[in-house]
Image (cartoon, rainbow, N blue to C red):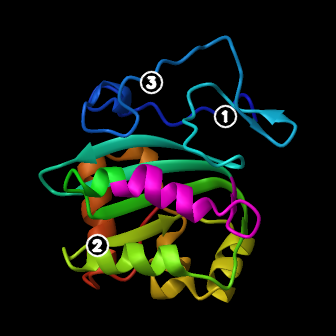
Amino acid sequence: MHDIEPYFGWRELYVASEDARSPFFGRKYSEFYFTNKLYNFYLHPQWDEFGSSTLYAKLLFTDYELGYALIELIGEWNDTLHNDIMFLKREIADALYREGVYKFVFFCENVLNFHGTVEDDYYAEWSEEIREEGGWVAVLNTRLHVEEEMQDCHLDYYLHFGEAYNDFNWRSQKPNLVFHVVEALVEGRTQRLAG
């Protein structure tokens, strides 16, 4: 896992550690020292830690005018043991929401597992807050077993995910196009993301 880097193709457009409004502002990164781990595996040092011991993120792009953020995740999303949704909401989503971000796109190709719980308080709170602003959360490119576990936990009440949100080659697109395509899908203006 140490050789899986966060996507860096949009760095000429946005760098979270240089954005004073970002929850990752001022972070310093090493190319040589690996400190974050997922179980016994070191992660590439460009991934950002935000409180979870199993889930890491990279804020790839934020547009404050349009109110959206594009975030890549890696690891295990584990609400059962580690309450990862609490960390994700409190440390990333809430910080961005205070800056006017209310539409979130998560790229989850590198989320290896999801372990849910019957409690959905953080999802419900997050959904209620952003819906007042016309916001939403979309989860793209989940593995089938991750999608099934999210479905079993009824997270489709709060998040947009599933077949229509998978197989999207977002890396070949500009961030604004990715956002507009996902927004059209969420708002029912298109049927499926194209690869």
**Amino acid on which the number 3 mark rests in the picture:** Arg
Task: Provide the residue designation for mark 1.
Answer: 4
- At which x and y percent is residue 181? 30, 65
Q: Residues within 10 Å of mark 1 (few under 14, many from 20)?
A: few
Which badge, 2 or 3, comes first in the chain's sequence? 3
Q: 90 or 38: which is nearer to us?
A: 90
Q: Which disc, if any, is residue 130?
A: 2
**Amino acid on which the number 2 mark rests in the picture:** Ile
Asked if the residue at tag 3 contacts the one at tag 1, i.e. Cβ–Cβ closer than 8 Å, the answer is no
Which badge, 1 or 3, comes first in the chain's sequence? 1
Q: Which disc, if any, is residue 149?
A: none
Q: Given the current orientation, which residue lies at the most extreme left position?
A: 65
**Amino acid on which the number 1 mark rests in the picture:** Ile
Residue visible at 62% across and 60% down in the picture = 84
Q: Quadrant of residue 20?
A: top left
Q: Magenta stretch?
A: 76-94
Of the residues tagged 1 and 2, which is closer to the observer? 2
Q: 170 or 40: which is nearer to us?
A: 40
Whether residue 107 is visible to the viewer of this picture, yes or no, is: no
**Against 147, is 188 above or below?**
below
Element type where label 1 sits in the image: loop
Element type where label 3 sits in the image: loop
Task: Provide the residue designation for mark 3.
Answer: 27
In the rendered structure, does residue 137 fall within the stretch colored magenta? no
Lateral position of residue 34 relative to residue 129, left or right: right
Q: Compute the Cα span from label 1 to label 3.
A: 19 Å
Whether residue 125 is visible to the viewer of this picture, yes or no, is: yes
